[in-house]
């Protein structure tokens, strides 16, 4: 049962609570289709609210919970989830690479990312996709109205999150992608996996002041996650008059990088809340065949974030 893993049930009338025990021992009883987000920690995830809101819009009854899965227990917890009627899952940190490893089939974009954020139970096996990159590009080009084409782009970080967005940025028509990471070997590995040596290359963090300026700077590190503490430091020479700064984190975890971006006078400063809603919409469409209207959901979450940040 989910509850034994520390489940948090998504609120709202769109997320139907289970009305009774799941009859696993009765041969002809169909378990209720269930969906969940897995992570560690996970209690503060917004995904249950987002999927409940999408389900309300679509008039679909579904159960979407948040399941805390310590990495070493993830595979076992996921197997129990499938046995109990689990049909789809979102995966967040630090489980995206583990999710990739346990999938039997993968989309091309999940394979190139080496990370999975969306799982679908198909033919008794997990099928893995990665909707992070599509979510980021849709937020930037749709909601923010930005044209990504021709932008020299700097990607900070080379973990699962960075790998999820790198290929999508290249596909969206950016001019080139420089990847820097605290551990340089991971930046090299990311760039190798992209397989576009003329457009994507790694650079050293210490050498950033020699890299010129960029029209797009994306922070995909987890440096401020969990605490929101600390300052972000990088040369202000990275910024020009058109620079868009994006943190794929949101809330407190995005504060240090976005504070730097404002101080460096970036033209646009964007956090990861829109990407979160858009990657969820991609997953919802994969599972339920319907594209949600993300705008009201995003606006409600944004209003709440503003209230949180401005509250004492
Ligand atoms: P995620 O799935 O969120 O990407 P991850 O795979 O653990 O999580 O990757 C975290 C990223 O943030 C990595 O690029 C990591 O750098 P390392 O590869 O050197 O570990 C980066 N990161 C984490 N803490 C950092 C810090 N204090 N300063 C700079 N980069 C940091």
Image (cartoon, helix red, strand yellow):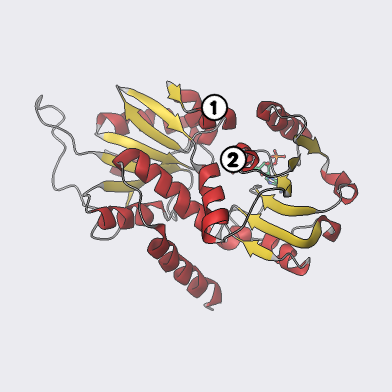
Dividing the image into four quarters, tell me where ligand 1 lies: top right
Label 2, on which residue?
168
Instruction: Check the image and report above or below for 12 versus 218.
Output: below
Q: Earlier in the sequence, mark 2 or mark 1?
A: 1
In terms of image quadrants, where is residue 188? top right
Q: In front here: 1 or 86? A: 86
- On the question of residue 68 being in view, the answer is no
Tag nearer the camera, 2 or 1 = 2
Q: Residues within 10 Å of mark 2 (few under 14, many from 20)?
A: many
Whether the residue under disc 2 has CB within 8 Å of ligand 1: no
Q: Which residue is at the front of the view, 8 or 90?
A: 90
Considering depth in this image, is 51 or 292 the residue closer to the camera? Answer: 292
Does any portion of residue 57 appear in the rendered image? yes
Classify the position of the C terminus by image quarter: bottom right
Mark 2 vs 1: CB contact within 8 A: no
Mark 2 to mark 1 CA distance (whole Å):
13 Å
Q: Quadrant of the N terminus?
A: top left
Q: Position of residue 178 (x, y in %)?
A: 76, 41
Residue 142 horizontal side relative to residue 157, left or right: left
Q: Could you say which disc has been placed on residue 111 in the image?
A: 1
* Residue located at (44% from left, 56% from top): 44
**Residue 201 x/y as whole percent:** 77, 35
Point out residue 109 in the picture as x, y percentages from the top left corner: 53, 32
Please report the residue visible at 21 percent of the width from the left and 49 percent of the height from the top. Answer: 61
SS for callout 1: helix
Residue at figure coordinates x 22%, y 54% from the top left: 59
Vertically, is 166 above or below 99? below
Report whether 162 appears left or right of 285: right
65 lies left or right of 266: left
Which label was assigned to residue 90?
none
Q: Is residue 162 left or right of residue 131?
A: right
Q: Residues within 10 Å of mark 1 (few under 14, many from 20)?
A: some
């Amino acid at each position: 049962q989910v509850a034994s893993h520390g489940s948090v049930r998504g609120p709202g009338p769109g997320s139907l609570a289970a009305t009774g025990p799941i009859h696993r021992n009765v041969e002809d009883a169909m378990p209720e289709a269930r969906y969940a987000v897995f992570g560690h920690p996970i209690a503060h995830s917004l995904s249950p609210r987002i999927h409940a809101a999408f389900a309300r819009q679509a008039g679909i009854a579904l159960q979407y919970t948040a399941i805390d899965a310590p990495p070493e227990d993830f595979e076992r917890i996921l197997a129990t989830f499938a046995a109990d009627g689990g049909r789809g899952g979102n995966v967040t940190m630090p489980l995206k690479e583990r999710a990739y490893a346990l999938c039997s089939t993968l989309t091309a974009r999940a394979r190139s990312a080496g990370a999975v954020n969306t799982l679908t139970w198909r033919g008794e096996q997990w099928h893995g996709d990665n909707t992070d990159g599509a979510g980021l590009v849709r937020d930037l080009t749709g909601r923010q109205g930005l044209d990504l084409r021709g932008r020299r782009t700097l990607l900070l970080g080379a973990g699962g999150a960075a790998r999820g967005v790198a290929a999508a940025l290249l596909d969206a028509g950016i001019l080139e992608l420089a990847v820097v990471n605290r551990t340089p070997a991971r930046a090299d590995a990311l760039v190798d996996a992209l397989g576009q040596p003329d457009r994507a290359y790694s650079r050293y963090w210490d050498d950033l002041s020699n890299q010129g300026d960029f029209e797009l700077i994306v922070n995909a590190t987890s440096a401020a996650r969990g605490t929101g503490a600390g300052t972000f430091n990088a040369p202000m020479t990275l910024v020009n008059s058109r620079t868009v700064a994006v943190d794929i984190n949101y809330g407190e975890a995005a504060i240090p990088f976005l504070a730097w971006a404002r101080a460096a006078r970036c033209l646009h400063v964007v956090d990861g809340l829109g990407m979160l809603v858009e990657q969820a919409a991609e997953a919802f469409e994969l599972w339920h065949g319907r594209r949600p209207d993300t705008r009201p959901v995003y606006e409600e979450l944004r209003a709440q974030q503003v209230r949180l940040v401005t509250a004492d």
